[in-house]
Amino acid sequence: MQNGSQTCENPEVLIIGGGPAGLAAAIAAYDRGCRKILLLEREPRLGGILQQCIHTGFGLQIFKDELSGPEYAQRYIDQLEQRGIAYQCDTMVLEISEQRLVTSVNPRLGLQRFQAGSVILAMGCRERSRGALGIPGTRSAGIYSAGTAQRFVNLEGYVPGKKIVILGSGDIGLIMARRMVFSGAEVLAVVEIMPFSSGLKRNVVQCLDDFGIPLLLSHTVTEIKGRGRLSAVVVSQVDERRRPIPGTEKEFDCDTLLLSVGLIPENELSRGAGVKLSVTTSGPLVDERMQTNVPGIFACGNVLHVHDLVDHVSEEAALAGEAAADYCRQPGLGLPEEFLLLEDGYGVRGTVPQRVAKQSLQGVLRLTFRPSQVFMNAAILLEADGVALQESRRRILTPGEMASISIRGKQLATLRDKKKLTIKIIES
Amino acid sequence: MYDVVIIGAGVIGCALARELSRWRLKLAVCEKNSDVADGASKANSAIVHSGHSNAPGSNMARFNLAGNLLYEQLCQELGVPLQRNGSLNIAFTDEEVGKLQQLMRDGEANGVSGMRIVGPDELRVMEPQLNAEVKAALFAPSSAITSPYELAVAMAENAAHNGAELILNCKVLKVEKREDSWTLFCSDRKLETQVLVNAAGLYADVFNNQVSAKKIKILPRKGQYWIVDKSYAGSFKHTIFQVPGSMGKGILLTPTVDGTILLGPTAEDQEDREDTSTSRESLEHIKTVAKRSWPALPEHALIGSFAGIRAHTKENDFIIGERQDAPGFFNAAGIESPGLSAAPAIAEELCKQIVSKLGAVKNNSFNPRRNPIPAFRHMSFAEKTAAIQRNPLFGRIVCRCEQITEAEIRASIRRPVGALTVDAVKRRTRAGMGRCQGGFCLPRVVDILSQELGLSPARITKDGSLSEILAGDRPDQPAMSSQCKTARRPAKTPRF
């Protein structure tokens, strides 16, 4: 059977999405002993968004090597193929039911339905659009999300513009600033509404500072001008409540505005399956094994919460893959009855998982979250039912980088009779 | 020599072209833009009004009522969505309740049927999300919603199918009277016609004033809108108006046939006829006013905003018919709301006058039917399977938010009034209209357009000339568009 159009009737584990999360989940499920696995990918090839991320910096943690996106993806694709795990490319999932009946479509294989033992959601995320920001002005050509521009340049071979302003200092925006310079374009500025960059520090240094591209913090684009093609944007300074300050307007003549203003987990399919979502992460609410509220449906990667590093995605996805494989063998283990609830405290946003089964309070429990602002020399404090459990110091915490804290052995065991664990930041 | 040339392929020009194609006439529509419905017809509230808000005795009242009644058959024949969702004009105070009664009397004078005042208890049932402080509302069951650009495309396609010619990217610079014909000097050609119809929307005064001593003046009036994501579909069933003011029907809230909800429009007079930019103040104003109707308005679900420009006149009425001092020159001018509602009736009336003037005979091969592009997302499991067997490209989703397939996108380009731009594909298929606003499908749509039109991707535009999507090849990959150097428009050009 040709690669990319294998099939598997009634798969035990069905994975939706062949990016880094889906690949790692499939491999982990296999290594856990599951042999009936099927992975569905909507693009003509595996690898997800990594295929257009041709810059390096991937895999430093997992492979101790500085890989490009396609190289990182290929290491997992190779592992997938060595194991003979079935996958279909060019295949879009249209619907997932609560009973894990999955409907997909493919030009050659047509409309298919799979009754899966367990389902792993690994659909990734999408970029926020101009519309969602409500930037006023004209609807001219030349306004693209940074990822769309990245696809044009890296995969299609076209430059979207010559004089560029970038709104938002998320990682894709920073990477694209450098990429556009490499493509012969002039990048006038990266504009960020917050008083800090929402990207990795290393990207600010390597993509902006090294190329002399100004980063305008506490600024935003307040108007878009140009008929036909974009001709200018107006940039204004904002106050501490992020409202534009009149009189601070500066006009930048440019033909392109790239938006890197946030990523949104793509959960339309999850919703259809009855999966409950977190208002903070916009991803499913999961337990420590990445299981959603719907038994047998698991989630990992950027569909669950937006990550900073792909290495973290792969690690998280492996947990989901193992859990999904276990579920098929013993569906009875599906939904534990008693949970410890996790709560975001001061300075903490989007802790994952949101609950932990009491029966699993052993070994190591790793919690991840985003700091809500920049903290210097602060501490992460865990409180169980209001009583301090553990404190861990950090030199710097920033929203651009995911923070994590682990609880081990004996301390975990003490949580069995607790109801709620709160994670908060203590400023020194 | 043409029998009839229509200036403007908006909803009026397209409706009239279709009506006239019932007759044996040599007929053309000249459009300055790269697509039909590219002006006010694409950016309005998409409502087929009941007709109670027009001054009794006006052209607006007459054509709105008649047009509304024609919509069922029109949309059925052309495969265009229409939902009789009914409208509610809501009143918060006793004074406003009084205005509702006046509105109902006007409506009755205009011939609108089925209206009644509903009280708060019934309103709660009809619209649970409506502000609980609403005291009463005027319910007009004949109000409907449609897709204005889909309708215009469908009418243009059907007109083309029946022999009409559509000339896109053709700007009429000047019209001149000959002995008993008209000459049109266009950007790239000259046309002669016996009858000239002015359906030029915002530029209708330009052409009228070139030929008639009875001058008109178009006063551009901008309206801005917000779009609410279709995850909130079903929040409102009816079109909700607040009590109207002097500048139009006020900020309304209406479901669309696509499941989104529109909030707007503002009414802002301006000099510029092309400036469809939105402004922070107006977009904030819409939110504030819309919250009076819908207190739980989900601001995070606003996926986009846009503006359209109404061709307002100080007469505040449609100017319809032959100019006495310019025989053979027919106006459809001052078309603002309820222009969409009135379009089928205006077309019928002008067609009657033109046919009688020219003594035209029936086109016996006229076929009123047009099959829309089959929409994969609306098919059953069995229909989807069959569609993919017939054409495997139904199995490839290009726009994932709206589930639009490659088959639909290619069809939208290959059909008679085929799409030439990214926005034209969007209007025909909804690709790019969903919550990611084209972030995912844009590169793919550009690629498909480039293949179908035989143009380099670097020459594909968003919405006509000067709106190129790309700035060119990547410098380290010089070969790409040079491979397309022989690029030419395909044999099937916008002319047919």
Image (cartoon, coloured by chain):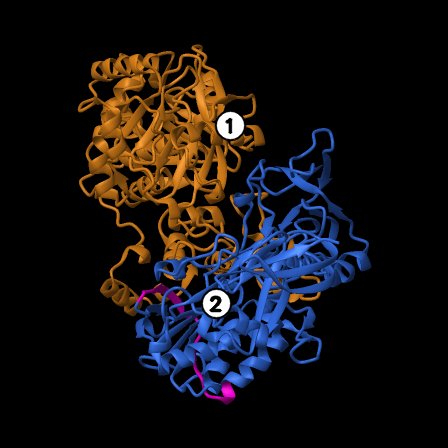
Chain drawn in blue:
A
Question: Looking at the image, is A14 positioned above or below residue B214?
Answer: below
Residue B285: mark: 1
**Residue A288 appears at what percent x and percent y?**
49, 70
Residue at (69%, 55%) from the top-left corner? A426
**Residue neighbourhood size for the residue with mark 1, other residues' Cα within 10 Å, grouped as few (<14), some (14–19), many (≥20):** some
Camera-nearest residue between A123 and B487: A123
Give the extent of the magenta segment: A81-98
Question: Looking at the image, is A367 positioned above or below residue B403?
Answer: below
Marks 2 and 1, Cα distance to the nearest angstrom? Answer: 52 Å
Q: Residue A394 lies in what quarter of the image? A: bottom right
Q: Chain of mark 2?
A: A
Asked whether residue A182 is in view, the answer is no
**Residue neighbourhood size for the residue with mark 2, other residues' Cα within 10 Å, grouped as few (<14), some (14–19), many (≥20):** few
**Residue A195 appears at what percent x and percent y?**
72, 46
Amino acid of disc 2: Asp
Question: Looking at the image, is B333 positioned above or below residue B128?
Answer: above
Residue A417: mark: 2
Residue at (54%, 71%) from the top-left corner? A414
